[in-house]
Amino acid sequence: MLPKGAQRDRVLKVVHDTSQEEVERVSRETGVPAADVYGAASFYTLISQPDAGARVCQGLSCRMAGSQELFADYLERGEPAIYASCIGQCDRAPAVLSPKMAVVSQRSAGAVSAANPELPMNLGGSDSLDYSALARSRELGGEGVLAALDASGLQGRGGAGFPAGRKWRAVLGETETERYVICNADEAEPGTFKDREVMLRRPHLLLEGLAICAETIGAKEVYLYIRGEFQEPIARLKAALAEVADGPLAGLNYHFVEGHGAYICGEETALLEAMEGRRGMPRIKPPYPTQEGFRGKPTVINNVETLACVPPIVLRGGEWFKGLGRTEAGTKLYCISGHVETPGVYELPLGVSLDELVAVAGGYVGEPVAFSPGGASSGFLPISERERALDFASLSEVGSMLGSAGVVVLNETFDLAEAACSQAIFFEDESCGQCAPCRIGTRLVHQALKGYLETRDPNALEHIEDLAWEMEEGSICGLGMVAALPLTSAIKHFPAAFSGGGQA
Amino acid sequence: MSAPLPDESFTLTINGQQTQARQGERVLGVAGRLGIEIPTLCEDSRLDPVGCCRMCLVEVGGQRRLQPACTWRAEAGQDVTTESPRIERHRKLLLEMYLADAPPVTDPHPLTPLNEISRLAEAHGALDRFPAACSEREGREDANPYIGFDPELCISCARCVRYCDEVEAVSAITLAGRGAGTTIATAGQIGLLDSTCELCGGCIDTCPTGAMHEKKPLAHTRTDSEVSTVRTTCNFCGVGCQLDIKVQDGRVVQIDSPPAGETLNDGNLCVKGRFAYDFIHHEDRLKTPLVRGADGNLREASWEEALKRAAEGLLGVKERHGADALGFVSSSRCTGEENYLVQKLARAAFGTNNCHSCAAT
Ligand SMILES: Cc1cc2nc3c(=O)[nH]c(=O)nc-3n(C[C@H](O)[C@H](O)[C@H](O)COP(=O)(O)O)c2cc1C
Ligand code: SF4
């Protein structure tokens, strides 16, 4: 029960740390009870650890590239440093965020596909300010845009692959006319950094996709929820908006909301909680955001890449887009990192194989052993699956998923048990803690792996099957459901790595 | 038991039994009407359901995943199953995870309510077989004399936090941190006395594990003699909250509210009703009327004598100064009926309208 006039959705914007004085100040300023302010602030690492020094990424790709040694170097030099969950710079591994949120790495920014006007997102090309797709969408009208979307077969690129057209139609079907559009740019799945490149290279494409969505579903307010670690993309987008706010985008209100260090806020309902100033704990669905989303109103939440596909679809037609795919519709931004020559973001037909993707990325480094096709959440597959189509359906057939298409390749030099442990640490650190299967399960899985790595005694892993079963069955959201998958899939495909010996 | 249902009721099936439900009802409540028990931890009839403890998951026809009975809305034609090998495996494993993370104390004090985790673990054959989770949940130094918090026993169901917000509208406590470290905290971990807390103790009442606990009686009670419960009415004010008073060897050792839903106070009490009972056995407590003797000292007297003395005094004032020189103020501890009698005494017996109750402001 909030006091009248309290402004909960300002809390996370104005709070800087979790000190008593700061919490009291924000409570006075917003009218939100001090305990609620503290509870929300303490959830987010960028607020609860504001002056922690350098944030050394401990995502899988960075770990494989030596982040532990890097961390030790900091401590040796007496420079304050903490470990951070994946900071979305896997192509520049090992990467660090400076206290001022600047990316520090020895390697230059990753590669993208070369310019090619036939590619919908064409990251290598130049961004265009003409907003011709927006103009075209006005000619087509809402129904025309939706028909093009349906024909395109565009599946959500945030991980779940839900058809974009159906999501927009769901909001249109609601009687409530106050509606919202939110761009999910919280990109934090280990191995994933494609949305970052879209925002950096094609900000206008994204802004235009958002405008088409807003006009189609009858929304005036457009929100971009961007992880706070992405200061450069945020600045780029803001600058782009300034160029067109009074031009083609007049009439729409764009709002930027920065994340505060919590992977779970990429889950759409946790994102809504964060935008409303609360702890980022996913909501129970139904109701879905299309029914009761931001401030309880019908809301479209789409991933950056999904929205960036919209303008080309509107301009060149759904059939054209669909035809670009191999096994499923359209092109896809594949992120690739780990043991490959040229990590980066490559736009390829949806359904290419790992071998094809790696060929574009300059080839394997060393002898490939395993890969993770879609972020930590997709677990590990053996290299024998190198020819499998990297798409939604084919990967789910083998108990994995395309997810965010954050592909990480591991060669013979990296221990699968270490890799699984890296993912276990990530999920334990990022569990919101709301439900017991995930909160306790991620903890126990990490403890078991740690125990195994210390002793190489397979008994340390004796309860894993039960824990994984319950995490999958009992968790509220996707995080807990898949959090044991890196370990169970690694055990399944690489039993030798978990039978007491060293490497697989 | 089943009141006539309004027209918009519909039929659904639970465990093969057809039953009626109304729009908006949740599966948990409908099943409860049929006498079907579904275990819960984060549910409290006074709070909005949140479905976070995962204890009440059931199978709903057409749904791939198990769904929480506390939040899932009953719908016409729905087919719900609350007992199956899959559900039983889930319940057992979930409880085993709770046992690993928040193990109940093995030798609980006789006045601590039964830890729900212990009770459910026994009912579902859950064993303490997983390694301890060793989650680091922050506790807090707190000098308040009544309410303690033991993070080791906390299962983050947030009943206390939601109670403090939804029932008391006080919001003194919050979930804090995240993941395995999630705990219950005040703003900046200050003591409850420095927070907005009103020390009503409702957090203790709703806590299923005893993580929120009462500091007082644990220090007072002996463990070697029996404790009986006396249901009575709180006499601190006229609301008439019911109390369950715990008595040991003729002494009050703890006061509880009857369970929510059972009496008019619905499980709620205020700081006085729950914690202010030290006066009962205090040596300074007045037990008989006192009147002042000719020597100026107070001495014990009968009620008859004391009332006579009061009447004489009041009538004397009226005689010398008129009835409006008198005023009658009744205590906030009086009931409505007693307040009525006080004003009647003022008006009918003494002839003045000068009457008031201190509970009126
Ligand atoms: C744990 C978790 C994390 C997620 N993180 C992201 C994310 O960083 N970005 C994103 O777009 N979607 C993320 N999602 C998926 C969103 O919940 C949602 O499905 C998506 O934003 C919808 O957009 P789309 O239909 O365009 O894919 C995540 C889901 C889960 C369960
Ligand atoms: S599964 Fe994990 S992240 Fe998701 S709601 Fe439960 S505790 Fe939170």
Image: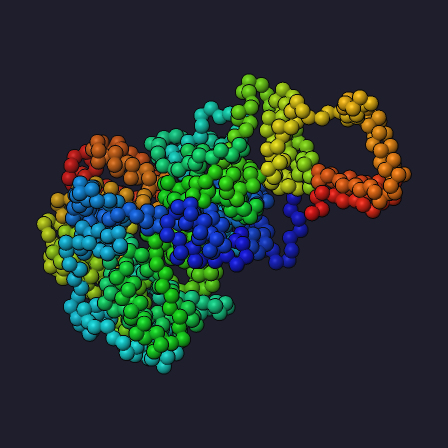
Q: Is residue A474 visible?
A: no
- Residues B144 and B48: in front is B144
The extreme left residue here reads A366
Above or below, A488 against A96 in this view is above
Above or below, A293 against B334 in this view is below
Q: Position of residue B222 (x, y in %)?
A: 55, 20
x 60%, y 26%: residue: B253
Count all numbered tags in the image, as a single digit. 0
Horizontal relation, residue A294 to residue A361: left or right: right
Q: Position of residue A258 (x, y in %)?
A: 34, 59
Horizontal relation, residue A133 to residue A221: left or right: left
- Residues A238 and B38: in front is A238
Q: Position of residue A360 (x, y in %)?
A: 14, 62
x 39%, y 30%: residue: B128
Q: Quarter of the image containing the C terminus of chain A? A: top left
The extreme bottom residue here reads A139
